[in-house]
Image (tube, rainbow, N blue to C red):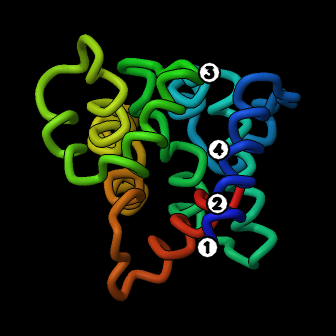
Amino acid sequence: MSLLSRLVYRIRQFRLAAFGPWQPVSDTSLSLFLSPQLISLFRRMTPSEQAHSFSVLQRLQAAGYQDLDLLAAALLHDVGKVNSSLSIWDRSLVVLGKRFFPRRIDRWSSGKPAGWSRPFVVAVHHPAWGADLAAAAGASPRSVDLVRRHQEADAGDDPWLAALRQADDSE
């Protein structure tokens, strides 16, 4: 992705996160993919995170994916952020930090999610936190694995992980 297209993507992402519009996702729609316990977990995310996750699901469906484990992971991939939610300004700080100081992210993301480095800790660790939450709420092992790995730089030979990453990154 070119620098200009990445910038446009991030500006659009900022606008959507800050101002919406967010269409509420019905429990009926969610129940096609999630158990009642997982729906409760999904509902703990912010409205913008719910809308984003539902958009990821819709992109996967539009691409022809029908596997329930993958589609459940699409809905839950950011659920780890409920442990320490990020404001739009926190998210912006993470984006700028990754862009201009990529080698420092490992250091900034170590430790507990507190203080000025909290957004970096959440950004890096939310996949593992989300996988633990999803497993505790009864998600399938495959969905849990996809949630845990959804930010890995290399999907290897896992087409579902690659599809989830692409759908997550194409908003």
Where is residue 136 drawn, in percent x and y?
A: 31, 33
Q: Nearer the viewer, residue 35 or 171?
A: 171
Of circles 1 and 3, the one toward us is 1
Q: Are marks 1 and 4 in contact (CB under 8 Å)?
A: no
Q: Are marks 4 and 3 in contact (CB under 8 Å)?
A: no
Which of the 4 quarters of the picture holds residue 89?
A: top right
Residue at disc 3, secondary structure: loop
Where is residue 128 drawn, in percent x and y?
A: 27, 43
The number of discs equals 4
Q: Which mark is residue 6?
A: 2
The answer to whether residue 148 is visible is yes
Name the quadrant of the N terminus.
bottom right
Compared across the picture, whether 77 is left or right of 75 comes to left
> Which residue, given by chain and number where applicable, does mark 4 sit on?
53
Q: Which mark is residue 120?
A: none
> Which residue, given by chain and number where applicable, does mark 1 sit on?
1
Residue at disc 1, secondary structure: loop
Residue type indicated by callout 4 = Ser
The image shows residue 164, relative to residue 83, as above or below, that is below
Q: Nearer the viewer, residue 112 or 68?
A: 112
Which residue is pictured at 75% across the width and 63% down the height? Answer: 59
Name the quadrant of the C terminus.
bottom right
